[in-house]
Image (tube, grey):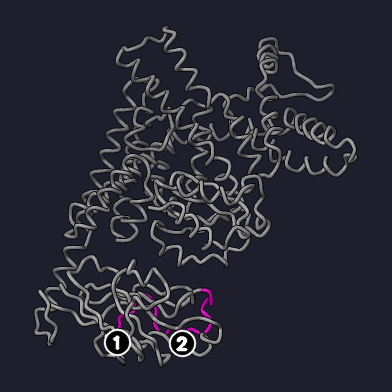
Amino acid sequence: MNYQELADKILNLVGGFNNVTGLTHCATRLRFNLKDEGIAQTEQLKKTPGVLGVAINGGQYQVIIGNDVNHVYKPIMEKCTGLESSKPAQEEKKSLAARFIDTITGIFTPVLPAITAAGMLKAVLSLLVAFHVVETTDQSYQIINFMGDAAFYFLPFLLANSAAKKFGCNAYLAMMLAGIMLHPNFLTMVSTASETGEGISLFFLPIYQASYSSSVIPIILSVWFMSYVEPIADRISPKAIKFFTKPLITILVAGIVTLVVLGPIGYIVAGWISTAVTTLNTYCSWLVPMLLGGLFPLLVMTGTHYGIIPIGINNRMTTGFDTIVYPANLASNIAQGAASFGVAFKTKSQEVRQIASSAAITAVCGITEPALFGVNMRYRTPLISACIGGAAGGLFMGLFVVKNYGGGSPGLLTLPGYLGGDGFHDLIFACIGALIAFVISFIVSFILYRDEKVSETAEENVTEPVETNEVVKGTALDICAPVEGEIKPLSAVNDPTFAQEIMGKGVAIYPSNGTFVSPVKGTIQMIFDTKHAIGIKSEEGVEILIHVGLDTVNLKGEHFETLVNVHDKVEIGTPLLKVDLEAIQKAGYDIITPMIITNTIEYNDIISLTEGNTHPKETVIKVVK
């Protein structure tokens, strides 16, 4: 894959540099903040080779790449210098919930590598102790231990940096706030005050006795407040001495408010969350892990899972372990991999087997997007299987209160993160929970996946004589024209996604009539919100996409009238759409209409007409079994 070309194409399709106000990435996604999401060519992006999908959620425009995301992110950032410190221009237009999710994601995504590395170091150290390679009194143990503790203890510094970029303020002043909260002298004052019972005060202002090492919420609140103080300091500072007075006013005000107000509020809120988790574990430990285990694929699908992960991090920072988020996420990730394995074992298609196997291995190792978007969502039943298996695994882990001590991307590689206070106890039960999720998801996926059933049904439907003059190796299924017009080869379509048959083989028609009809007897599977494209599945299992015009998604449904609904049964010739072709052409759009067999890989050959005139009910494609 040429990452530079892919990066250029993505940047162009999201509206170019001028439409981008912010960009971060996680393990598999580019997360854009766009001035105008309507400019982005979402349908084109989804069809771009190297792009697994597009999700729009929480005020972010997320382009799903997979494990190679960093290789695509770097060339984009080289062209978009200064993005990290910018505030999204569209932020004021978002809902409160969308802004919250966007903020949490933007703050935590950049620090996840450090947290993952620290968690894995602690896990490796636990293994070394368990197998008596080192003792807890050894210097080697102590050095590796504080190496692993560093990211957790100084987490406020890491969060200060990413929060400053998210809130659009000075990152170094933000990290100075973290330094104030973690200064050894302040920690000594807190420790002494706790022992003597005396209070701490700054002049007449009382300071709450709290230790902010490993804390999450206090520094985020403080940097958020500083983002409002800094521009005020900039306005009131005389121009001649602004270089000195602006940072002085900013840090003096923000620092005092942090120690007196915001730090204590964040500390107390974190304590409430910890208490709620403890109470939940006491009276109903199974409920939330079961729900999260089942729902995580849907959260990942929408990109909102990063709004959940900080809860797990906060749990570990306050109690030393997490019993909700990370165990449930482990069950879900393993279940997603198992669902893809189920497809790989059952499918008759070599290409599907290869894709599903590769995605499954990645998923059980902790990165699920390739399996989710490349297999499970595509075939639907594996997604259901993953939800069922994840819920079952989460239920088991909740019932036995499995504790995660190390974090990291939940999967087989981070299982050592379950080594902790009870030796191998949590690791053993985490493995059992993961095994339950895997077995149930695999079995359900294997049973529900319909690749073989589709083939059998198709064979039954074509056992009746089919009149055809084509010389083919097997039985052929006829696909009729959806509209009257002139036949063109797909290579004539001015869109590489269609012309290069990336979505599948088929035919193109330059329509002369605005009424589009069903080319097969079957069921309406999908109608785009913008009405420009319809998906149909024939009774024999052939999946067909009729895409009226090029880039007509930008018309947002104008000049299109749908005549059917999703799940409607249709016959050959049933009217589907009425389209004002003249108006579309006047708007500057090409009306050439590709008709694609989207499950091309399931058939031996697709034979299409390449020229001539056609009309509805006339065969233009033969699908060869």
Location of residue 330 in the rendering, given as x and y in whole percent from the top left corner:
36, 39
Question: Who is closer to the viewer here, 68 or 568?
Answer: 68
Residue 559 within the magenta-colored segment of the rendering: yes
Q: Which residues are magenta?
A: 554-571
10 Å neighbourhood of mark 2: few (<14), some, or many (≥20)? many
Which of the 4 image quarters holds residue 184? top right
SS at badge 2: strand
x and y, in percent, of residue 242 in the image: 85, 37
Nearer-N-terminus badge (1/2): 2
Q: Which mark is residue 611?
A: 1
Q: Which residue does the numbered mark 2 point to in the structure image? A: 579
Magenta span includes 40: no
Q: Position of residue 441 (x, y in %)?
A: 26, 48
Label 1 crowd (10 A; few <14 / some 14-19 / many >=20) = some
In the depicted structure, whether residue 386 falls above or below residue 177: below
> What is the chief secondary structure element of the magenta stretch?
loop
Q: Residue at x 29, y 87 (%)?
A: 611
